Amino acid sequence: MVAIYKSGMGAALQDIAVISNNIANAGTVSFKRSDTIFEDIYATEKNRTSEIRLGNGVQKLEPRRAHQQGSFIMTNAALDLAINGEGFFAIKNPSNPDELKYTRNGSINLTNEGELVTMEGFKFLDTEGNEIKIPFTVIDNQENPRRLSAINVAANGQIQVDYGQGVSINVATIGLSTFKDETKLRSDGNTNYVVTPESGAAINSAPQDTSTATGTIQSGALEAANVDTTNELARLLRAQQAFSGTSRLMQADVDMIRRLID
């Protein structure tokens, strides 16, 4: 019985840890909440005529991430991008070009070299997997230099850069990646994910691609965490009560054994 109680307490502790992490990241852009997954452990009593499955505790499984889309936070910043639908931005580690990660966080910074990067310095990629670079100055038809005046990102991911009145250039199309099973992506911190064998390789395409069902780009917005704080607090109370109840049962069982021994 002690082993059964111990497994129940361990399951409740894992539930508390996962829910606490959800609540702690409720304000993190593009964070995806996780759910704890458990399954019953059964023992079969074979010395009876008909088999009877007896409960033998609970087994903890890997928490499952819920990738439902969060609501949008309107910022009106040209380089704040939210994905309305399926897909992840592909980002490259500048210190390790072979390392690719994927994120829904579209808070983009423009470097002094014209590169589009995350807060950690990872570079955003276009539909071909190339780094996106925006020139600050171009030469117009009259051989006059024109400096960058505005950046606009369309719903289909096209990045249009304006260089004063009458001069606009489509620099690139920001890419989106989809996966066979996005719930199997491994979290790598800072709302970034890496590919696993279970998730399948990334399928790169443009936004609004019907063949891969990628979503559209919402410029001037960021995706909020998909965490309902009220619901998470209710779940946390249930998990704490489950831990408290199991620990009391375990203590009662220990006290009963001690009295029998004495």
Image: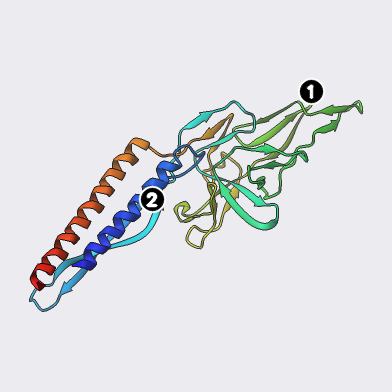
Horizontal side, residue 23 vs residue 259: left or right: right
Q: Which residue is mark 2?
A: 18
Q: Measured from the top left, where is residue 182 in percent x and y?
A: 47, 52
In this picture, is 71 found above or below 242? Answer: above
Residue at x 20%, y 53% (from the top left corner): 245
Indicate which disc, 1 or 2, sits on the residue closer to the N terminus.
Answer: 2
Residue 130 rendering spot, x and y as whole percentages: 70, 49
Residue found farthest to the bottom: 47
**Residue located beneath label 1 in the image:** 164
Between residues 132 and 20, which one lies in front from this camera angle? 20
Coloring scheme used: rainbow
Q: Residue furthest top?
A: 165
Please state which of residues 210 and 62 is positioned toward the viewer in this rendering.
Answer: 62
Q: Is residue 111 left or right of residue 33?
A: right
Q: Secondary structure at mark 2?
A: helix
The front one of 205 and 14 is 14
Q: Amino acid at mark 1?
A: Gly
Give the quarter of the figure containing the N terminus. bottom left
Specify whether 16 is left or right of 249: right
Label 1 crowd (10 A; few <14 / some 14-19 / many >=20) = few
Tell which tag, 1 or 2, sits nearer the viewer. Answer: 2
**Residue 115 in view in this figure:** yes
The residue sitting at 59% across, 52% down in the picture is 101
Residue 194 percent location from the top left of the image: 55, 55
* Disc 2 crowd, CA 10 A, few/some/many (<14, 14-19, 20+): some
State which quadrant residue 237 falls in.
Answer: top left
To which quarter of the image does residue 233 belong? top left
